[in-house]
Image (cartoon, helix red, strand yellow):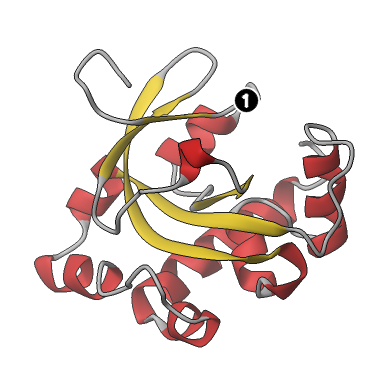
């Protein structure tokens, strides 16, 4: 919990704070653990990065095997090369991890970006529910717009990260 009593999610890496604040990182994929359960769509959370804290909003939640996540959702977390890239990264934290293991996908957006959306866009984005399907996420018009911007960033920067 943060000093304000708001739940936190820790992020590692020098550039992650900027990627969240800039709208390039729109998701985080985590191994199933109690500390990642109980989040709700629309909930404000603190992204605790190496040298800063950023208020974020949860826009979507999925729990399923990594290899079942749609490629577009993996890109939202920076995995431009898909499941094998995500698996390798998660193995850095959990050596026994394999692509068929269940993960928690949390769709996130910086609160400042969320607040810059129109009321209608906010409603559409938060129309997601905890048991949403891949098709519902991928079909969300607000996410499609955000995805294109995120994908462009990750494509341009994949060799630098």
Badge 1 marks a residue whose secondary structure is loop
Residue 103 position, x and y percent, is: 64, 56
| Residue in the foreground of this view, choosing between 105 and 125 | 105
- Does 22 sit above or below residue 10? below
Residue 35 position, x and y percent, is: 48, 36
Residue 42 position, x and y percent, is: 24, 55
Give the residue at x 87% y 46%: 88
Give the residue at x 51% y 67%: 147
In this view, which residue lies farthest toward the front? 34
- Does 13 sit above or below residue 39? above
Decide if residue 105 is on the left or right side of residue 144.
Answer: right
Q: Residues within 10 Å of mark 1 (few under 14, many from 20)?
A: few
> What is the quadrant of the N terminus in the image?
top left
Residue 152 visible in the displayed image: no
Residue 73 position, x and y percent, is: 60, 66
Give the residue at x 65% y 61%: 75
> What is the quadrant of the C terminus in the image?
top right
Among the 4 quarters of the image, the one containing residue 21:
top left
| Residue in the foreground of this view, choosing between 18 and 36 | 36
Residue carrying label 1: 12
């Amino acid at each position: 919990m943060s000093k304000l009593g708001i739940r936190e999610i820790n992020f590692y890496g020098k550039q992650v704070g900027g990627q969240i604040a800039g709208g390039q990182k729109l998701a985080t994929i985590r191994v199933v653990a109690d500390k990642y359960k109980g989040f709700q769509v629309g909930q404000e959370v603190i992204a605790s990065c190496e040298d800063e804290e950023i208020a974020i909003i949860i826009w979507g939640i999925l729990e399923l095997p990594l290899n079942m996540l749609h490629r577009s959702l993996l890109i939202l977390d920076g995995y431009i090369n898909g499941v094998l890239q995500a698996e390798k990264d998660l193995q850095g934290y959990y050596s026994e991890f394999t692509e068929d293991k269940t993960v928690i996908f949390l769709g996130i957006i910086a609160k400042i970006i969320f607040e810059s959306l129109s009321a209608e866009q906010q409603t559409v984005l938060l129309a997601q529910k905890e048991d949403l399907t891949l098709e519902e996420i991928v079909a969300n018009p607000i996410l499609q717009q955000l995805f294109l911007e995120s994908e462009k960033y990750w494509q341009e920067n994949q060799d630098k990260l």
